[in-house]
Image (cartoon, rainbow, N blue to C red):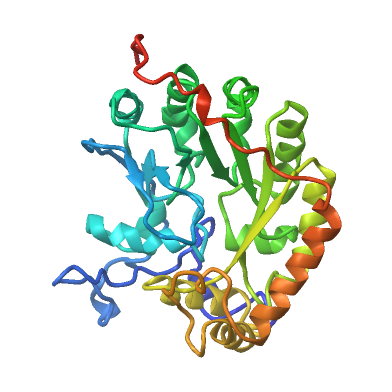
C-alpha cells in the first residue's frame, strides 16, 4: 500500500478536510455508528453545504489572548468551507450544537447584519480607533463570500470612517476588493496576510481542499503589492514531518512576489481537532503518521495540544527550536530590508455624520 493509499480511502469524502464527525462535548445525545448493519446508507456521506443566517447583537470582539497580536476581531462567517484539516477554529462550532468535523465545513452561518453592526460600533462615542482583524476565527473570503459579499460591505464601512483593518486569507477572492483595499492602504489603514502552508500542491489539496493553490496565493501577494497594499505571508501551521522543510522556500517565494514580512505558528491539536487531524493523517500519509505525531508531541511537552499563552504558538523543545531557527534565518535572509508599515490611527473619522445603505 502506497503512502497516499491509507486506511479507509475507499470511504474518503473527496473535497473535504475532515473525514469524521467527532462527538460534540456539549450534547448529551450523540449519533454513532456502532451497528452499521442496521443503516440503509452510511452516516458519513458527501454532505452538501448548508447556510443559515445569524443575527448577533454585536460584531466586534475584543481579543484577550496576549500572544495573538491583535486587539479586536470581526467574523462575518462561522464555520469554513475551506475544510483545513488542522483548523483550530473547528472547536468553536460545538458551541452552536454542531460537530467540529464535517459539520464545520458544511453547516455554515453567515452574519448579514455585520456591516450595520460595525458602523454602529464605530459611531459609539467611546470607541477609540484600534485595528480590527478580519477574521479571528474563519476565513472572511471563503467561497460563501463570493455570493454574500459581507466582507466587501464591511470594507466599505472601514473606508467610510477611515478606520484601520487587518485581513488574513488563503483565498484569491480578496482581489475582487482591490479598489477598497487600495483606498484604505493609501492612508495606511489596511494590512493583508496571505496564508501559505505549503508549495506542494498535492499536500495542499489534501490538507486544505477548498482553498486557492499556492501559485494563486503567490500571485495574490504580487497583485496586492503592485497595487500598493502592504502584504505579508503567514506560514501557519508549521507541521513537523509534513511542511517544516518548506519554510525557506515559502518565505523566499513570498518575498520574491512582494511580501513585506512573514509570520508563523506551529500546529497544536486542541480539542476535537486532535481526532480530526489524526484521522486525516492516517488516511493520507500512513507511513508518516507515527513520525509526525511524535514530533508534534515533542513541540508541546509530550502532548499534541497546548493552551499556555506565549508557548502554544511557538512550541518548545528540540523540534520547536529547529523550526524557530530555520524561520528566523529565512526571514533575516529574505526580509532584512523590508517591514510592514504601521497603521495610522489618526485618520479615523470619529462619529461620522453619514449613514450607509445596504
Q: Position of residue 254 (x, y in %)?
A: 77, 49
Above or below, 179 against 324 in this view is above
Q: Position of residue 97 (x, y in %)?
A: 22, 58
Residue sitting nearer the eye, 283 or 315: 315
Q: Residue furthest left?
A: 28
Does residue 45 appear in the picture of this structure?
no
* Quarter of the rendering containing residue 35: bottom left
Q: Residue at x 70, y 37 (%)?
A: 220
Residue sitting nearer the eye, 236 or 324: 324
Instruction: Report the side of 63 relative to 225 (left or right).
Output: left
Locate the C terminus by quadrant.
top left
Instruction: Report the side of 205 relative to 55 (left or right).
Output: right
Locate the N terminus by quadrant.
bottom right
* Quarter of the rendering containing residue 324: bottom right
Residue sitting nearer the eye, 77 or 202: 77
Above or below, 181 against 16 in this view is above
Instruction: Report the side of 3 relative to 135 (left or right).
Output: right
Q: What number of labels is visible?
A: 0
Q: Residue at x 80, y 48 (%)?
A: 255
Q: Residue at x 63, y 72 (%)?
A: 239
Q: Position of residue 282 (x, y in %)?
A: 55, 80
Does residue 256 appear in the picture of this structure?
yes
Above or below, 119 against 245 in this view is above
Q: Residue at x 74, y 32 (%)?
A: 223
Q: Position of residue 286 (x, y in %)?
A: 61, 82
Amino acid at each position: 500500500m502506497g503512502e497516499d493509499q491509507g486506511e479507509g480511502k475507499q470511504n474518503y469524502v473527496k473535497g473535504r478536510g475532515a473525514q469524521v464527525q467527532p462527538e460534540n462535548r456539549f450534547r448529551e445525545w450523540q449519533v454513532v455508528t456502532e451497528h452499521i448493519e442496521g443503516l440503509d446508507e452510511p452516516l458519513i456521506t458527501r454532505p452538501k453545504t448548508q447556510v443559515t443566517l445569524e443575527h448577533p447583537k454585536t460584531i466586534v470582539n475584543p481579543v484577550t489572548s496576549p500572544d495573538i497580536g491583535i486587539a479586536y476581531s470581526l467574523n462575518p462567517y462561522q464555520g469554513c468551507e475551506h475544510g483545513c484539516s488542522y483548523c483550530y477554529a473547528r472547536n468553536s462550532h460545538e458551541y452552536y450544537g454542531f460537530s467540529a468535523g464535517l459539520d464545520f465545513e458544511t453547516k455554515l452561518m453567515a452574519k448579514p447584519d455585520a456591516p450595520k453592526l460595525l458602523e454602529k460600533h464605530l459611531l459609539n462615542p467611546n470607541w477609540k480607533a484600534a485595528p480590527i482583524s478580519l477574521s479571528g476565527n474563519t476565513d472572511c473570503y471563503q467561497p460563501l463570500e463570493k455570493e454574500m459579499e459581507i466582507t466587501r460591505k464591511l470594507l466599505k464601512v472601514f473606508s467610510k470612517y477611515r478606520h484601520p483593518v487587518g485581513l488574513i486569507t488563503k483565498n484569491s477572492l480578496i482581489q475582487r476588493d482591490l479598489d477598497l483595499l487600495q483606498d484604505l492602504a493609501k492612508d495606511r489603514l489596511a494590512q493583508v496576510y496571505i496564508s501559505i502552508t505549503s508549495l506542494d500542491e498535492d499536500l495542499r489539496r489534501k490538507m486544505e481542499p477548498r482553498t486557492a493553490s499556492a501559485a494563486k496565493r503567490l500571485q495574490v501577494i504580487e497583485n496586492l503589492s503592485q497595487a500598493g497594499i502592504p502584504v505579508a505571508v503567514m506560514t501557519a501551521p508549521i507541521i513537523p514531518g509534513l511542511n517544516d522543510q518548506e519554510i525557506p522556500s515559502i518565505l523566499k517565494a513570498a518575498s520574491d512576489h512582494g511580501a513585506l514580512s512573514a509570520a508563523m505558528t506551529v500546529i497544536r491539536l486542541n480539542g476535537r481537532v486532535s481526532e480530526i487531524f489524526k484521522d486525516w493523517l492516517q488516511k493520507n500519509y500512513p507511513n508518516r503518521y507515527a513520525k509526525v505525531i511524535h514530533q508534534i508531541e515533542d513541540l508541546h511537552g509530550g502532548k499534541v495540544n497546548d493552551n499556555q499563552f506565549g508557548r502554544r504558538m511557538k512550541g518548545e523543545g528540540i523540534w520547536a527550536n529547529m523550526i524557530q531557527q530555520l524561520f528566523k534565518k529565512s526571514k533575516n535572509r529574505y526580509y532584512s530590508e523590508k517591514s510592514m508599515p504601521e497603521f495610522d490611527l489618526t485618520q479615523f473619522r470619529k462619529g461620522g455624520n453619514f449613514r450607509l445603505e445596504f
